[in-house]
Amino acid sequence: MSIADRGIASIVLVVLLAWVNAAAAANESPQEMIRSVTGNVLETLREHNADNAMSQKQLVALIEQQVVPYFDFNLMSAQVLGRYWRNASEAQREQFTAFRQLLTNTYAAVFGRYEGQAVEMLGMHQSGGSDRVLVSTLVKKPGKPEIKVDYRLYQNKGAWKIYDVVADGISLLINYRSEYANELSRGSLDGLIAKLQAKNTAFGSKSP
C-alpha cells in the first residue's frame, strides 16, 4: 500500500470513529462532540468484531445514514474540482455525486477492517475565521505508529460540517484534487464522472 493509500485509509477510519451518531452531540463544540461520541463508536466496532462481520451492503447503508450527513459534499466537490466545478452544468454537478458514493464505499471498506484503534484528543483552535476550526487527534493502536489526524470543519446554519481531514500531513481534498486534476488534464469532466461511476459499480458487484 502506498503512503497516499495509507493516509486515505487512516483518514476514513478516523472520520468514522469520530462522527458516527454525532447527532446526539449536535449542540456541543466540535472537540466535545468528537470526544463524547468516540467511546460509543469504539464499543460498537468492538461488538461487530465479536459477532459476525457486517456485509458490504450493511456497512454502506450504515455510513450513508450515520456518517454522510456530517460532510459538506458540495463544498468538498467545489474544492476538489476547482474551476471545473465552477464551469460545470447542473447536470454534471448532480452526476458528480459519484464522488460522494466513492468516498462512502471507501469508508465502508475501511470500516470493515477495524482493528482496535483508539483516539486521543489533542485540542482545537480556530482556523481561517470564527466559523472555521481545526480539531487535532491521535489515532493509537498497540504496536503501530501513532497517526496524527486534523479535522477541518466550518459552521453552516448552526451545524458543524467536515470539509477536509488531514492524516499524517495527507489532505483528503488535496489528494483527490491532484488525482482529478491529472485526469481532467487528459480528458473531460464527463470522462472523470464516468470513471467514478464505473468504480462504484465495480465495488457494488463484489459482494452482497
Image: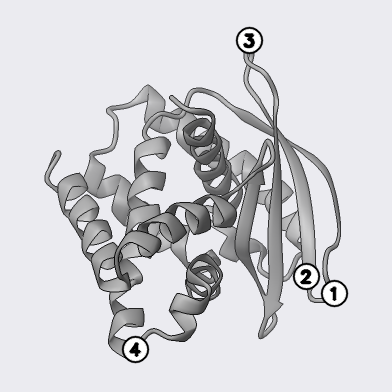
Q: Nearer the viewer, mark 4 or mark 3?
A: 4
Three-letter code, disc 4: Ser
- Does 175 sit left or right of 53 as displayed? right
Residue receiving disc 3: 143
Of residues 188 and 115, which is closer to you in this image?
Answer: 188
At mark 1, the secondary structure is: loop
On the image, the x and y values in percent for residue 102 come to 34, 55
Are the two marked residues, 2 and 1, in contact with CB atoms closer than 8 angstroms? Answer: yes
Of residues 79 and 206, which is closer to you in this image?
Answer: 79
Question: Quarter of the image containing the N terminus?
Answer: top left
Q: Nearer the viewer, mark 4 or mark 1?
A: 4
On the image, the x and y values in percent for residue 175 come to 53, 49
Marks 4 and 2, Cα distance to the nearest angstrom?
Answer: 29 Å
Rendered image quadrant of residue 101: bottom left
Sequence order check, earlier mark of 4 and 1: 4
Residue receiving disc 4: 89
- Does 3 sit left or right of 108 as displayed? right
Three-letter code, disc 1: Gly
Task: Please determine whether, in this image, residue 26 is positioned above or below residue 60.
Answer: below
Residue receiving disc 1: 129
Sequence order check, earlier mark of 2 and 3: 2
Residue receiving disc 2: 132
